[in-house]
Amino acid sequence: MYHELEKSDDEAEDFDNEALQSFSIAGKQAAEALEFGKNLIKKGARIIDILDKVEAKIGKNIAFPAQLSINDVAAHSCPDDGDVSVLGDDVVKLDVGVHVNGYIADNAVTVDLSGKWKELLKANTEALNAAIAIAVPGTSTGTIGKTVQEILSSYGYSAVRNLSGHGLGRYKVHTLPSIPNVPTGSPTKLRAGMVIAIEPFATNGAGVVYESGEAGVYMLEKKKSVRDPITRSALSFIEKYNGLPFARKWLTRQFGKGRTNFALRHMEQQEILRGYPPLVDEKHGIVSQMEKTVLVAEKPVVLTKV
């Protein structure tokens, strides 16, 4: 799941062996769920059916709603219940996360159903692998961004510069450090034992994304008391996710569309929630995404591996 490029570089979390074991189990489960979902991505398949099946496979350890973003949409596409959209000659990004005891593994893959974007996916995969190879103690995050951009540029593509990878924590999908996809000059250095999501986004478009359309993914920002019973019931339902992102469709199926829309609107007005609309390339270029969760070590360990 993407991360907005951070301006600050605070200390990342340190993890004990028990936490790292949970990360490792989550990584295997996340990789299995991603591979399962990848095999469902076919022309004529209904998008919401793919996401429902992936989420059902993950079960109660889901870290955030599975998302399937198409063509110029980089991330955060998560349709509401009842959506009938199907896949065609599309470039499809699937983003999946799992937690074990709250410790999160995050991974994504792109599938080209059009057959036209082999080089884009090749460049994206090469950039991801090169970034993973240098995810060792002492590497600066700015160096990772420089590496990603240089590889994508060599193929004639751009990195999406206002999206980045990120640290992972306990019940926190996004923690510092940010892992940029372009040179930032950041001196922040990786430390042994950090768990990070490296996720280059590659495009033939502007390399800048903006929010467009209605949010299908939300996250609890702060807890406040609410008076009306509809919103109170929805908030109680949301709180069981321990601050992790949730999908509009999960509420719709529980409370119906009318009550869900009312509750979400009320909670956004009260700044209880933040919505995450789909992110679209400014020039509507094709966007691909590749992502792995990595344990920083002298020999980096890819945790999201089947």
Image (tube, helix red, strand yellow):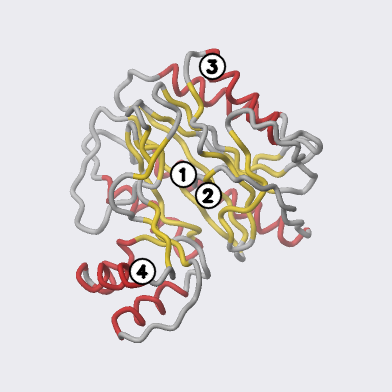
Disc number at residue 269? Answer: 4
Give the number of the mark in front: 4 or 1: 4
Q: Give how far across and how far down residue 306 sits, in percent.
A: 56, 42
Alpha-carbon span between mark 1 and mark 2: 6 Å
Mark 4 and mark 2 lie on one chain; the one further toward the N terminus is 2
SS for dot 2: helix
Mark 1 neighbour density, 10 Å: few (under 14) some (14–19) many (20 or more): many
Alpha-carbon span between mark 4 and mark 1: 35 Å
Give the number of the mark in front: 4 or 2: 4
Q: Which residue is label 2 attached to?
A: 30
Mark 2 and mark 3 lie on one chain; the one further toward the N terminus is 2
Alpha-carbon span between mark 4 and mark 2: 34 Å
Which residue lies at the image location 36% right of the left edge and 82% below the top edge? 232
Q: Give how far across and how far down residue 183 sits, in percent.
A: 63, 28
Q: Amino acid at mark 4?
A: Gln
Mark 1 and mark 3 lie on one chain; the one further toward the N terminus is 1
Q: Give how far across and how far down residue 240 sits, in percent.
A: 47, 74
Residue sitting nearer the eye, 75 or 63: 75
SS for dot 3: helix
Q: Which residue is label 1 attached to?
A: 34
SS for dot 1: helix
